[in-house]
Image (cartoon, rainbow, N blue to C red):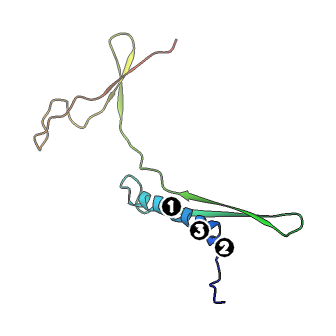
């Protein structure tokens, strides 16, 4: 009998290794995402719980694979708080140029986004 010694992670018909590979794919996608920091670490943790019965004849196990990817980079901007003419206020997104002005490459600066703020009573 020339059987290869099994590894614990191969139990469950290989589901543990499959789950690890699944999470590894997700973490690598996170690394390749240009919206995440390039040089921050990512982690994958496998938490294995072993629970023997009272007679120590059987051991139940559960495995949780926890990825820890990096969050996406923050999106920054600025708004100006301005009166809206109805006694309320509005937020006007700040833009790098005056709306309607042409940039160096011939593109016209779009009008900024405006958000109306409802006043609470």
Of 29 and 71, the residue lying toward us = 29
Q: Position of residue 95 (x, y in %)?
A: 26, 35
Q: Residues within 10 Å of mark 1 (few under 14, many from 20)?
A: few
How many numbered circles are shown?
3
Q: Residue at x 64, y 76 (%)?
A: 7
Residue 86 occupies quadrant: top left
| Picture layout, residue 120 above or below residue 24 | above
Of 80 and 17, the residue lying toward us = 17
Residue 44 occupies quadrant: bottom right
Position of residue 108 in the picture relative to residue 113 (left or right): left
User: Disc 1 and disc 2: Cα gap in Å?
Assistant: 18 Å
Residue 100 occupies quadrant: top left
Labels 1, 3: front one = 3
Quickly name the residue at label 3.
Answer: 14
User: Disc 1 and disc 3: Cα gap in Å?
Assistant: 12 Å
Q: Say which element carries label 1.
A: helix
Q: Residues within 10 Å of mark 3 (few under 14, many from 20)?
A: few
Labels 2, 3: front one = 3
Q: Residue at x 11, y 44 (%)?
A: 105
Q: Residue at x 54, y 65 (%)?
A: 18
Q: Earlier in the sequence, mark 1 or mark 2?
A: 2
Quickly name the residue at label 2.
Answer: 8
Q: Position of residue 108 (x, y in %)?
A: 14, 35
Position of residue 7 in the picture relative to residue 22 (left or right): right
Q: Earlier in the sequence, mark 2 or mark 3?
A: 2
Q: Earlier in the sequence, mark 1 or mark 3?
A: 3
Quickly name the residue at label 1.
Answer: 22
């Amino acid at each position: 009998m020339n059987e290869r010694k099994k590894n614990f992670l191969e139990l469950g018909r290989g589901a543990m290794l499959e789950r690890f590979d699944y999470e590894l794919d997700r973490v690598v996608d996170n690394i390749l995402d240009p919206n995440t920091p390039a040089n921050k670490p990512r982690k994958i943790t496998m938490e294995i719980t072993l629970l023997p019965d009272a007679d120590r004849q059987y051991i139940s196990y559960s495995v949780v694979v926890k990825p820890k990817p990096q969050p996406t980079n923050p999106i920054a901007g600025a708004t100006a708080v301005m009166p809206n003419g109805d006694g309320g206020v509005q937020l006007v997104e700040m833009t790098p140029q005056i709306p309607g002005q042409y940039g160096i490459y011939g593109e016209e600066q779009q009008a900024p986004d405006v958000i109306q703020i409802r006043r609470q009573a």
